[in-house]
Image (spheres, helix red, strand yellow):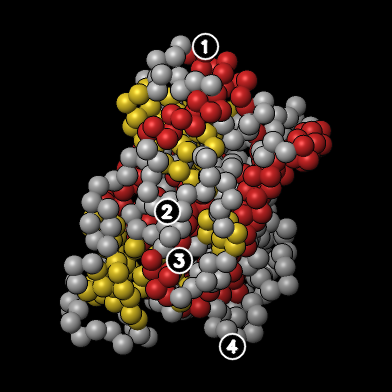
Amino acid sequence: MVDARMDEDVHDVLVVGGGPTGMMLAAELRLQGIDVVVLEKEEEPSRLVRSLGLHARSIEILDQRGILERFLAEGTVYPGIGRFAGIPSASSPELDTAHGYTLGIPQPVTDRLLEERARELGADVQRGREVVDIAQDAESVDLVLADGEHVRGRWAVACDGGRSRVRGLLGIGFPGEAAEHVWLLGEMEVTAPAEEVAAVSERVRREHRGFGIGPSSNPGLHRAVVPAEGVAEDRTEGPTFEEFLERLRVFAGTDFGGHSPVSLTRFTDATRLAERFRSGRVLLAGDAAHVHPPLGGQGLNLGIQDAFNLGWKLAAVIAGQAPPALLDSYEAERRPVAADVLTTTRAQSVLISGEPGALALRRVLGELMDLPEVDRLLSEKIASLSIRYDLWPGGEAPGGIVGRRLRDLPVGSGRLFERMREGRWTLIDPSGAFDDERWSDAVDHLVEPVEDLPAPAALLRPDGHIAWAATAPAPEGPGLPAAQSSLDPSSPEPDPSTLESVLEHWLPR
C-alpha cells in the first residue's frame, strides 16, 4: 500500500529518467494536457556523446510534432541511410519516406532540444532527484527519493537506462547476453594533421572494423572509438584519458596527439530484453526495457519511438478516452520491435568482428546487398521504416497497409505532417464521405485532396500508424454504419473493415 507520509499531491505521470526517452515521453504527455513530473538523478545534463544521430523514422516523428527545424539547425544532414554493419552497396533503393537521410547530431544536443520541448509544454523537470524505492497499489504509485521524500503519481514510467533501478525494484527480469566486447568512445582535440588521421583510420579499419577516428560534429574536435583492453568489472566508472590514448596507440600506433578531452565513455555489446514492459501502474521505455550493441546507431532512436508509441496511449487512458486495456498494446507493439533490433545488432556485431568467418560472410552479404530488395530491407530495419503493428487478431486487416506508418504526403496546399502537430487522430477523407460528429473531439477530419494516398480514405493514430483504410469508396448516405465492438476485452472482435467499428475499438463512446 502507499505510504501515508507522502505528499497529498498526486501527479498524473512520474517519468523516472531525463534522457531522450523520458523527455520525449514528457513532451507527448504534456501535448495532451497531462500533468507530468520528470525525476532525473543527475544534477546537470550529461556531456557524454553516446549517440551520433537520428534515423529517418525519428526524423519523421520530430517533423510530425513541428520541432524538426530545431534539430536540422544544429545537426548535419547525411544523404542516405546508414549501412548495415558498414557494408558498402552499389544499390540505391528508394525508401518510403520524405526524409531519406541521417541527421548527424551529438546526443547532448538531442537531449537539450528534447528537454527544451518538454519544458516549453509545461513538464516539471526536476534534477538531482534519485529514486531509491517504489510502492504501488490499485490507484497510484509512490516513489521514494534518496532524500527520503515521497512523490506520488497515478502512473510511472521508467526511462532510467539499461541499469534501471526501477526495473530492478519491480523484479522484472532482464535476460540476455552479458557484454563480451567493450569499446572506448571519446571526443578530443588532436595535433595530428587531418590527412594523417584519415590515412591511419582507413588503414586500421581494414582489419579492425571496431576502430574509427574522424572529425566530430563539434568544431575543432575529433571523435574516436577503439576496442578496450577487456570487459571492466565496474563499467559504471568511465575510462581515464590515459587509458583511451593507450588503446589508440595499441591499435593505430599513434595517439594522434590527443589532448583536452571533452567526452569519454565506454559501451558494450550486452544484449538484453525485459521480460515485460509493464508491472501494474509502472511501465518501462527506452534502455530500461532493452539494451543492445550500438551497431547501426539505433538505441536512442528506439527509445524516442517507444515514447512516441506510449505517450498518446497513456494520455488517452488518463483522460478517460480509452480504458486501461489500451496500455497492453504498448508492450504488444513495441517489444517485438525491440527484439528485432536486438537480432539485427547482434548480427552486425558478428559482421564487424574481423574473424575469417565474419569476413567471408561480409563478402557474401555485400553481394546480396547489391540487390535493391535486400538493401532496402536492411536499410528499412536500421531506419525503422518497415514496422507494422499487428492491430487485429489473425494478422493484417483488409487493405494491406493497416498497422504501417504513413509517410508525409501533400495535403491541400500543405503537408500531412503539418496537420498532425497536436497529436490527435487524423481521418484522411478526400471525398468527405466518412463523417460522424461523435468523434470530433478526438479526430481531425481532413476533407482535402491528398496526393498518393494508398487508399480511398485512412484513419491515422496519433503516432501516424494506419488504424483503418478504406478498400472502396464509402456508401452513399450520411454518417457511418453501426459500431460492432469496443476495446472491452469481453466484447466481440471488431470488424477492421468498418470505420465505425475501428473508431469504437480505439475511442469507445
In primary-sequence order, the first of circles 1 and 2 is 1
In front: label 3 or label 4? 3
Image check: 180 left or right of 145?
A: right
**Numbered circle sitting on residue 284:** 3
Dot 4 alpha-carbon crowd within 10 angstroms: few under 14, some 14 to 19, many 20 or more: few
In primary-sequence order, the first of circles 4 and 2 is 2
- Provide the residue designation for mark 4: 490
In primary-sequence order, the first of circles 1 and 4 is 1
In front: label 1 or label 3? 1
Note whether residue 153 is visible. Answer: no
- Distance from the alpha carbon under mark 1 to that under mark 4: 68 Å
Is disc 1 in contact with disc 2, using a CB cutoff of under 8 Å?
A: no
Q: Secondary structure at mark 2?
A: loop
- Provide the residue designation for mark 2: 234
Q: Residue at x 60, y 81 (%)?
A: 485
Instruction: Identify the amino acid type marked 2.
Output: Asp
Dot 3 alpha-carbon crowd within 10 angstroms: few under 14, some 14 to 19, many 20 or more: many
Is disc 1 in contact with disc 4, using a CB cutoff of under 8 Å?
A: no
- 39 or 294, nearer to the observer: 294
Q: Residue at x 57, y 15 (%)?
A: 199
Instruction: Identify the amino acid type marked 3.
Output: Leu
Instruction: Identify the amino acid type marked 4.
Output: Ser
- Provide the residue designation for mark 1: 195
Instruction: Identify the amino acid type marked 1.
Output: Glu
In front: label 4 or label 2? 2
In primary-sequence order, the first of circles 2 and 3 is 2
